[in-house]
């Protein structure tokens, strides 16, 4: 915030081990915002090899008119990111707040924890309008992830909070070792894990869709916290067959 186009162009980055500047790859123009909240960045061009867009962002907005590489919105705490194409892996890793919207598809590890860590996404919202790969919301603690199409495997593995909504189908491994949190699948799960128990059928509205869902609790193979003497389980809701 507050930097002139020339100052932004002089900011340092890296291409592998080589030090570069933003100006080596981008033409920078426009007027600076006085604060982060007043700063709106538009990136035009191919960013499919540009990593860490919006890393640790706190406010303002970033729009990418195309694809983006790994770590979009990593550890961000506020603001809005709009990717008008596809994103690679680790989108929203360690995210604490703000909003990420991806018009295309996403690869793996959306809203997850950094490898070797146990603290995944804590807050904010990630919406993927296309499909997603594997390991969505691994070690998730809070926030919301919405996949508007299909997902592959491993949803909310090790999660202790948060909400994941899959509006298409999932192949399997949904909620493995999950302790708390909610998963909604509006399509089908090809392979259910044995650690989830069916308890009821309920009617809910999920991201604008009203439907009946089969409610499961689990993962029954994990330890679960207690509240007022009752165990608290993770919830898996799968849209009931018509």
Image: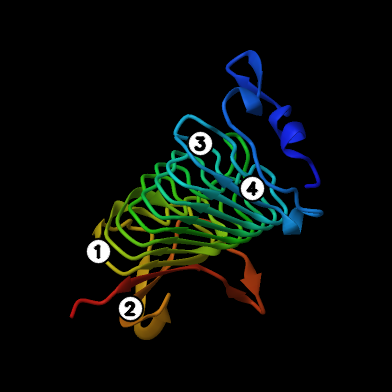
Q: Residue furthest front?
A: 30
Which residue has dot 2 on it?
Answer: 213
Which residue has dot 4 on it?
Answer: 119
Q: Nearer the viewer, residue 12 or 161?
A: 12
Residue 70 is tagged as: 3
Residue depicted at x 74% and y 58%? 38
Distance from the alpha carbon under mark 3 to that under mark 2: 34 Å
Q: Report crowding for label 1: few under 14, some 14 to 19, many 20 or more residues within 10 A (C-alpha).
A: some
Which residue has dot 1 on it?
Answer: 188
Q: Is residue 115 left or right of residue 218?
A: right
Are discs 1 and 3 less than 8 Å apart at CB? no
Q: Report crowding for label 4: few under 14, some 14 to 19, many 20 or more residues within 10 A (C-alpha).
A: many
Q: Residue furthest bottom?
A: 203
Confirm whether residue 223 shows in the render.
no
Which badge, 1 or 2, comes first in the chain's sequence?
Answer: 1
Element class at badge 4 = loop
Q: Nearer the viewer, residue 193 or 49?
A: 49
Q: Nearer the viewer, residue 115 or 67?
A: 67
Which badge, 1 or 3, comes first in the chain's sequence?
Answer: 3
């Amino acid at each position: 915030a507050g930097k002139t186009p020339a100052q932004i162009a002089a900011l340092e980055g890296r291409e592998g081990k080589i030090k570069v500047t933003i100006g080596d790859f981008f033409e920078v123009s426009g007027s600076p915002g006085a604060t982060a909240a007043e700063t709106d960045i538009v990136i035009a061009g191919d960013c499919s090899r540009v990593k860490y867009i919006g890393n640790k962002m706190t406010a303002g907005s970033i729009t990418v008119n195309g694809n983006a590489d790994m770590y979009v919105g990593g550890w961000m705490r506020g603001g809005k990111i709009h990717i008008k194409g596809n994103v690679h892996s680790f989108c929203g890793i360690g995210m604490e707040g703000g909003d990420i919207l991806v018009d295309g598809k996403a690869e793996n590890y959306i809203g997850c924890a950094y490898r070797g860590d146990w603290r995944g996404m804590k807050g904010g919202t990630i919406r993927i309008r296309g499909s997603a790969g594997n390991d969505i919301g691994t070690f998730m603690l809070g926030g919301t992830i919405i996949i508007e199409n299909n997902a592959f495997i491993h949803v909310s593995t090790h999660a202790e909070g948060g909400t994941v909504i899959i509006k298409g189908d999932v192949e399997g491994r949904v909620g493995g070792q999950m302790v708390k949190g909610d998963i909604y699948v509006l399509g089908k799960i090809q392979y259910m894990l044995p650690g989830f128990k069916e308890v009821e059928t309920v009617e809910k509205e999920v991201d604008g869709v009203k439907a009946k869902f089969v409610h499961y609790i689990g993962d029954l193979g994990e330890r679960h916290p207690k509240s007022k003497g009752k165990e608290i389980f993770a919830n898996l809701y799968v849209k009931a067959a018509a």
